[in-house]
Amino acid sequence: MRDATLWAAGAALAFLLTAGAFLVLANLATGPATEDLPATPARGKPGPPLDLDLNRDRLDSLKPAPDQELLLTVENSGGRDFSNVNLTLEASSGDTANPNARYYRQTLRNLKSGEDVEVRFLLDLSKTAEASPPPTAPDETSEIIEIRATTPEGVSVVRTAILPL
Amino acid sequence: MRCSPPRSLLVAACATACAAVLLAGCVHPTEGGPIQPLPPAEGRVNPGLGPDARPLSSGPGYKGSPSWSPGGDRVAFIVDGYVVDRTVDGEQLTRWTTKDFVAAEAEWTADGSLTMLGGAGAVEGRPGAVYRTDPKEEGSLGVEEILEGVLAMAPGPERKDVVVALEMGPDESGLSLLRAGQMERIYTGTVQGTVTGASTSPDGDRVALAVRPAGDGSSHELHVFDLRTGEARKISEIQDGRGILGAPQWTDRGIYFVAGALSPPGDDGEPLYNLYRTAPEPGEPEPAPGVGEDFVAGGARVSPDGDRLAVVGRLNPKSPLNLYVLDLQTGSLDAVTTNEDMEIKTGPDDLAWSPAGTSVAIVARGASSGEPEVRAATAEELLDAFYNLYEIPITTPEPPGAPR
């Protein structure tokens, strides 16, 4: 009777240890890898782990005036947290002879995986008087907003908005 | 008797577990998995001008007046009024003037310098000044003013000389010849009216001039100025309120020019210009043979060998803008772009032949929706969002029996 009990206990322990080992193996070998892979490639390209979303309605509301509020969404769609996301924004005229570029900067702390955060910039989009108009200038003028997001981990993304202001 | 199987089973189980743990330890952790960067060419879309079109510039800026260097390895152009050039096979950009310079036209000359017509006057239809860069001072942004009161300029054969039309008085123009930045000759003979465009003959002996007569709002006279005798004469006049667009083009087969109504007759806001040809003798211009009676022309440029004409235009008012090459000997008209939603500039100075006659540079951008756009690239990388230069290769069909 005692031998049978020892046999049963030993077999159960062996089963549990083996099963546990395989569980550890399964978790280490497969679990995190699927999370770290880039998003499903679109047309052969991997999805970015960091994304910037500029909503068209938000851009439509911008005027050639000071104190224009630009809202953009920073999204961590990758599998890792970002300790910092540095955002730099350059607003410049579509007329490259106009030196009046404006620069803005913000830093997001600890953007977790799967999290998206809305960031607000207050921009000066007012027109400056041009000393001499460019020859044969097109009818429309544009304002260019270039936004770059970078992380200490080396992830970066850039978006350029062209506004017909 | 003691039974040993449980003990051995326990040892076996422990060994299996240890092996499993060791095996698990051999698997590489997935920390630091691949993070794909954005492709550097993101945003560089097909320019929509056909598979052979190649961009020569990128990024923002209103560009125009391309001019190939004599060696064909660089292309100069105007961006928002200032003058730059770019290597054709690379991306090395050289700025030649300060950004507040206001250039209306830039032409490369045989000595490696750029001759520029500029100043606020030139932009507003009044006389400007001719400036010249020093090829030894590349990147210095220093330019030398050569002449004031310049109405128009045209490079001579092989770009050795530059012919400039000068304002001599109210409704009177004169001509002068520049070589290597020096005044080579001033002609005493004058032209009655204001010269608005000039083109030298293939032999360099004469100049075709578009002239705005006194008291008229448009240039509707063609004159020929003989550089050997210094005499000018009117050879043709355009009637019905039409005006000549840009400079006439002196070819092996006569003088070609674009003319049309300055005010649009239709509601679409686009003037309808036609391509004409005339002999360099007094006579009546005729519609250019080969293009068809519905052809709407924009800018036109004669090839370096004088036997072809590059024209930006439409086969009919409803068809898309494209770059066409007219073979002046055979009269065949070939589209060399396949425009897909691109706006090609139709200005008289917005196209240029390469020195070998194997390419034409044009200026185009994607059709603007008038709505905000967001692109996944830096502004400097973008092509179709702004007016940019494109090289369009031109293939010349070999004549029958020509050696390969």
Image: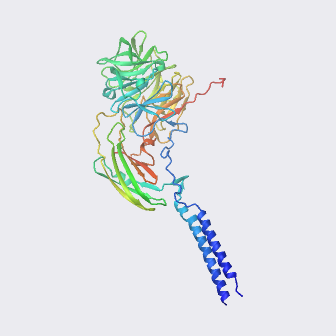
* Outermost top residue: B229
If the image is split into quadrants, where does the N terminus of chain A sit?
A: bottom right
Seen from the viewer's position, the closer of residues A27 and B264 is A27
Residue A46 pos. (x, y %): 52, 54
Seen from the viewer's position, the closer of residues B252 and B88 is B88
The tally of labels here is: 0
Residue A20 pos. (x, y %): 59, 73
**Colour scheme shown:** rainbow
Residue at 31%, 18% in the rendered image: B171
Seen from the viewer's position, the closer of residues A37 and B160 is A37
* Outermost bottom residue: A1
Residue at 37%, 49% in the rendered image: A88
Residue A154 pos. (x, y %): 46, 52
User: In this picture, is B355 found above or below A46?
Assistant: above
Image quarter of residue B237: top left
Asked whether residue B275 appears in the rendered view, the answer is: yes
Residue at 52%, 57% in the rendered image: B32
If the image is split into quadrants, where does the C terminus of chain A sit?
A: top left
* Outermost front residue: B1
Residue B174 pos. (x, y %): 35, 15
Asked whether residue B196 appears in the rendered view, the answer is: no
